[in-house]
Image: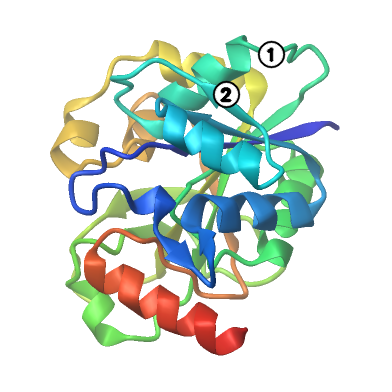
Amino acid sequence: MKTLILIPSRLSATRLPGKPLLKINGLSIISHVFNKAKEANIGEVLVATEDQEIVQEVTNNGGQAILTKKGHKTGSDRIFEALQKIDSSHIDLVMNLQGDEPLIDVNDIRNLNNLMIKNQSQLGTLASQILDQNMYENQNVVKVITKEDLDVANFPEALNFIRNISKHSKNIYHHLGIYCYQIDVLKKFVSYKQTTNELDNKLEQLRALDNGIKINVALAKSASFGVDTEEDFVAIKKIMEYKS
């Protein structure tokens, strides 16, 4: 099966404007994410963006990018437009990797792709163990509740995605910013209107659950978190500069 990785990215993020171009170790966040996707070696990688500056940045660093229109409501809607601009006849799976996840582990990307193929799932994502109790109350950390305990071998269904939860519930994990769609499921997903649930929680994956699309969840071996705020950027910068 052929997989295409599409990375949605835009400069106008409300909480941290301009974040894709913020630099860590001399390289922009979007280029770090592109390089991780490339390193996974599961298929072609493209950035989908509404900003010419991001196209320029990605191509200057040896990557490929597609300019999309402004005003997309979600990353999945943006990657679908990009998909329509290329020949996708040979593509079976589309991976939507968020452009603000520079800490995502290459092996976790590969594992998600392998589980999607093995289980012929409609839609898959990643989640990691919650090790810091403060994450339960942190609105910026999206949580997923799964049908069963997550382990390295299984790929259970997601029951719900939430931002705020008491830590007493069962099978709660930290959701990571990556989705893998069967191509026809992505087409179906973007044809649905945004649901009230999705809009209230600002979580596009709820549109899938609200419309009966099953989401399977794989355990990520490495905890990763996205760059949503200035604090996140400082923390991730520190981690990545220490590693190098």
Drawn side of residue 197 relative to residue 46, left or right: left
Q: Is residue 158 above or below residue 3?
A: below
Q: Residues within 10 Å of mark 2 (few under 14, many from 20)?
A: many
Q: Nearer the viewer, residue 173 or 33?
A: 33
Q: Quadrant of residue 72?
A: top left
Q: Residue at x 81, y 45 (%)?
A: 42
Q: Residue at x 24, y 48 (%)?
A: 17
Tell me which amino acid carries mark 2: Ile
Q: Position of residue 34 (x, y in %)?
A: 63, 49
What element does badge 2 sit on? strand
What element does badge 1 sit on? loop
Q: Nearer the viewer, residue 38 or 53?
A: 53
Q: Position of residue 155 (x, y in %)?
A: 63, 56
User: Which is more N-terminal, label 1 or label 2?
Assistant: 2
Q: Position of residue 61 (x, y in %)?
A: 65, 47
Tell me which amino acid carries mark 1: Ile
Mark 2, residue position = 66
Q: Is residue 235 above or below residue 110?
A: below
Which of label 2 and label 1 is nearer to you? 2
Question: In this view of the protein, can residue 15 be seen by the observer?
Answer: yes
**How many marks on residues?**
2
Q: Nearer the viewer, residue 124 or 36?
A: 36
Mark 1, residue position = 86
* Mark 2 vs 1: CB contact within 8 A: yes
Question: In this view of the protein, can residue 96 be seen by the observer?
Answer: no
CA–CA distance in space, label 2 to label 1: 9 Å
Q: Is residue 15 above or below residue 129?
A: above
Q: Residues within 10 Å of mark 1 (few under 14, many from 20)?
A: few
Q: Residue at x 43, y 76 (%)?
A: 237
Which labelled disc corresponds to residue 146? Answer: none
Quarter of the picture containing the C terminus is bottom right
> In the rendered view, how is the structure colored?
rainbow
